[in-house]
Image (cartoon, grey):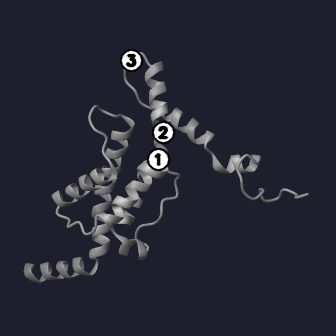
Amino acid sequence: MTFSQLRSQVDALLRKYATEVETYRLGKVTTEFCDEVADALTNPKSGPVKDPFDWASVLFKRMAKRGYRPRNLTPIQNYLTRCLQERRVLPQAREVLRALLPRAAERGLIPRTLEDPVPICAMKRGLENAARSDDSGSSGLGLSDLIEHWQKMDYWRQLAKGSLPGPSPVGEATA
């Protein structure tokens, strides 16, 4: 088998599995992007605050730099608007990828995220508290702070106690 035959077979496989390859490669880009957004929102620097359109353009520029052709700005901008302005949570890489590649999401190549999103306001409050109590000047949440936050926010425990609206827990007798 010659190199040209081998190359044509590789090209045929890349065309056949183009969606899978694009999903894999864009996964790295979206993870880096979400890390950058989380860093910018939890450790704010001086300067204007970016809106979801600005963040979407940052992502598209990064994609173009790596050789991807961004198709549609609207779904990713809508997702970032929901995250940053309506729900006040940090964007998640899988959900960004689902917004960028809807066909791959329909085919089941990108599973939904099972983790709860991290709220921005809790992260900022934690950083402010850490900055006040820490004399070293470095502000940041430790692992124990995040674990404590998630234990406070545990939905199932609050539902079992009856402090959340909704149906009563399974196994509890109704009067």
Specify the amino acid type for callout 1: Arg
Q: 164 or 93: nearer the eye?
A: 164
Foreground: 175 or 13? 175
Q: CA distance from mark 1 to mark 2?
A: 7 Å
Mark 1–mark 3 Cα distance, whole angstroms, equals: 29 Å
Q: Secondary structure at mark 2?
A: helix
Residue at the spot x=31%, y=40% of the render? Answer: 49
Q: Are the two marked residues, 1 and 2, in contact with CB atoms closer than 8 angstroms? A: yes
Q: Quadrant of residue 79?
A: bottom left
- Residue 115: x percent and y percent? 52, 54
Amino acid type of the residue that numbered disc 3 sits on in the rendered structure = Ser
Cα separation between marks 3 and 2: 23 Å
Q: Closer to us: mark 3 or mark 2? A: 2
Of pointers 3 and 2, the one earlier in the residue sequence: 2
The picture places residue 97, in percent across and down from the top left corner, at 36, 62
Residue 136: assigned label: 3
Which label sits in the foreground, 1 or 3?
1
x, y (%) of residue 28?
30, 56
Q: The residue under label 2 is which amino acid type?
A: Cys
| Residue drawn at (32%, 60%) of the image | 27
Of the 4 image quadrants, the one containing the C terminus is bottom right
Q: Which part of the image, by quadrant, shows the N terminus?
A: bottom left
Asked whether the beta carbons under mark 3 and mark 2 sit within 8 Å of each other, the answer is no
- Mark 1 touching mark 3, by CB under 8 A? no
> What is the number of the mark on residue 88?
1
The answer to whether residue 92 is left or right of residue 154 is: left
Q: For mark 2, what is the residue?
A: 121
Report the number of numbered marks: 3
